[in-house]
Amino acid sequence: MALKVADRVKETTTTTGTGAVSLGGAEPNFRTFASVLSNADTTYYAIIDNSNLAFEVGLGTYATSGNTITRTTVLSSSNSNSAVNFSAGTKDVILTYPADKSVFEDADGVVSIENFQFDTNAIKSTNTNGNIQLFANGTGYVELYGNTNAGAVRFNCESNSHGVTLKGPPHSATATYTLELPNADGSAGQLLKTDGSGKLAFTSALPGVTATTAELNYLDITTLGLTAASKAVTADANGVVTFDNGTIDESTTITSSSNAATLNLRDGNSFLHDLTENVTYTFSNPAASGKVSMFVLKIIQGSSARTITWPSSVDWAAATAPTLTATNDGVDVFVFFTIDGGTTYYGFTAGQAMG
């Protein structure tokens, strides 16, 4: 069941009509079709009828049963390239190789097969805008062998003066895997991402990130640990942050209710309280033990002298809390810090009667 050609195969036939040709034996110094063909093999034949000046060249199928050649496809003939209705008499049947089916190298070293040319290391289509297709079978694939380098494919420009090469990994990588291309061509700015099994898909550069380009540019920092205008604050390799132009903190205004007020240290480190009643303070949400929480409290005395009850965790100098300035609108400033998560706050008087 293969196409075969061979030399010195020639028999006679007395078959008439347009049907299969029964072979009658080899002529002297020639071989029979049966000696080179198996059942259902195809081959090119030529039937020559010298007595009636008729001929036929075609592709035939050999059958061992009956020792016949079925004239499957007529390529050329004396009957306008159709099957010849052969008359009685002896005809020659030759295993041939038609000129328009032959493959040969011309004077320039080019081999042409229908619409293809094979020139040195090149395969060219002679059709206008012709494609070159490579067909694998079943689960097979088109394979590019390496030699001294890994197998590679190069995509040239239209002038073939430069190009881009895709190359396989080296032998030392012992790499054998498959990359499957995405089902669609993706969107502008997307990247190719593998699922870990070689299946590629287009995805955003930073999946799950909704920040704008301007927001991401806040992270475009020249020197870690040194603040810069319109940039995120970072620490250097030692965990140190240097504020190039100092820091500005907002002041949080405290109000009391039912003689109680809370200073939430998550609100900032500068607090202002204009007293309207006697008040008991609570300090909340300091930094964890081992970290420092420090804050300033400015108190403005009311029209009547008000008093403050400090948290029991505040440790004043000489264990004595200061007495507030009793003058209306008198200003007292106090500083506190803790390093044990609020178990102890150290309290300092920064100034009194400053209003």
Image (cartoon, helix red, strand yellow):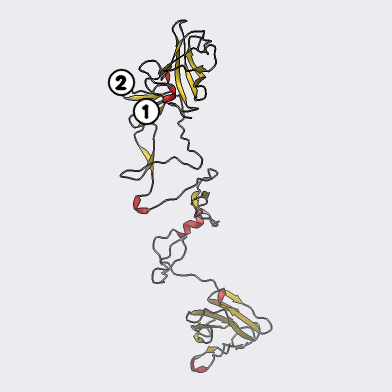
* Residue 218, image x, y percentages: 47, 59
Marks 1 and 2 sit apart, C-alpha to C-alpha, by 13 Å
Vertical order, 20 against 4 (above or below): above
Vertical order, 259 against 247 (above or below): below
Which of 266 and 85 lies nearest the eye of the viewer? 85
Which of 305 and 290 lies nearest the eye of the viewer? 290
Which of 26 and 61 lies nearest the eye of the viewer? 26
Dot 2 amino acid type:
Ala
**Circles 1 and 2: CB distance less than 8 Å?**
no
How many residues crowd mark 2 within 10 Å: few (<14), some (14–19), many (20+)? Answer: few
Dot 1 amino acid type:
Phe
Element assignment for label 1: strand
Vertical order, 268 against 112 (above or below): below
Residue 12 lies left or right of residue 186; in this view the side is left
Residue that mark 1 sits on: 118
Which of 215 and 118 lies nearest the eye of the viewer? 118
* Residue 84, image x, y percentages: 52, 11
Residue that mark 2 sits on: 107
How many residues crowd mark 1 within 10 Å: few (<14), some (14–19), many (20+)? Answer: some
